[in-house]
Amino acid sequence: MNGFRTAANKDAGFLVPLVSESSGGVWPAVWRALADAGESVEQSAIRYLTNPSNKLSVKNTTLAEANDSRVGAMIIYQEDPVSLNENDDCDQPPLPRDLFDALQPYRELSDPNSLFIAEICLLHKARGQGLGSRFLDYAKKLTIEKKLPRVSLRVFSANLGAVRLYERNGFQIEDQRPVIAHPDIKIEESVLLMSCSV
């Protein structure tokens, strides 16, 4: 393992499939809705991830490398009080109503006084080797450095392996909401908000 490094704009293409898979289709649905005319979902995603005004972006991404190859990523930032307006970002157009409604559980599950792990994504070949726990340890270190009391994350209840990983690393379920059905979102059951004090 080479270790961790901060992502750059050139890494956005690496992030797109990882975030697409880990989000259960949530982020691809957003990127599709925000795509410009003639723009593919991947192009829209890269534009979104390289926009420094977005929280989910390369500027907030830490990459894991092994043998000089990228094998995983963690996107992490300080939570803000969540607005329930359709047009939260002044530079983004409103989302379609059905998608905006489907994202309601994620807006409601927020811990403003925490460092928030938006995504932990690993290549299949890098799983089961302790990298997820290393990312979580790094997140706790960043939380302490920022003088915040907790680190938080959201996870789908159906992702039992991830839930167990987080519990082994000291995270507890704080709240949950049922997933709202949407044609582009491939997840059922519930979204969990989990946190860990540091």
Image (cartoon, rainbow, N blue to C red):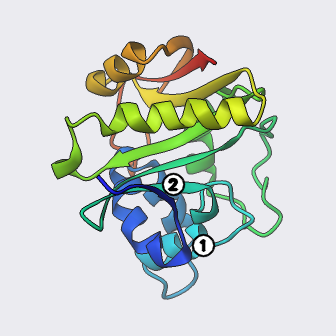
In percent of width and height, residue 100 lies at: 63, 47
Q: Nearer the viewer, residue 10 or 96?
A: 10
Left or right of 78? Residue 96 is: left
Left or right of 71? Residue 194 is: right
Q: Earlier in the sequence, mark 2 or mark 1?
A: 1
Q: Nearer the viewer, residue 105 or 10?
A: 10
When asked about the image quadrant of residue 151, the answer is top right
Q: Residues within 10 Å of mark 2 (few under 14, many from 20)?
A: many
- Find numbered disc 2 in the image and state the secondary structure of the residue it sits on: strand
Look at discs 2 and 1 and give the one toward the viewer: 2
Mark carried by residue 126:
none
**Residue ID at (37%, 30%):** 133
Q: Amino acid at mark 2?
A: Thr
Q: Visible in this render: residue 62? A: yes
In percent of width and height, residue 13 lies at: 41, 73
Q: Amino acid at mark 1?
A: Thr
Q: Is residue 54 shown above or below 144?
A: below
CA gap between label 2 and label 1 equals: 14 Å
Q: Nearer the viewer, residue 106 or 81?
A: 81
**Residue ID at (54%, 17%):** 176
Q: Residues within 10 Å of mark 1 (few under 14, many from 20)?
A: some
In percent of width and height, residue 110 lies at: 68, 28
Q: Which residue is mark 2?
A: 62
Q: Which residue is mark 1?
A: 50
Question: Which quarter of the image is occupied by the C terminus?
Answer: top right
In percent of width and height, residue 187 lies at: 35, 36
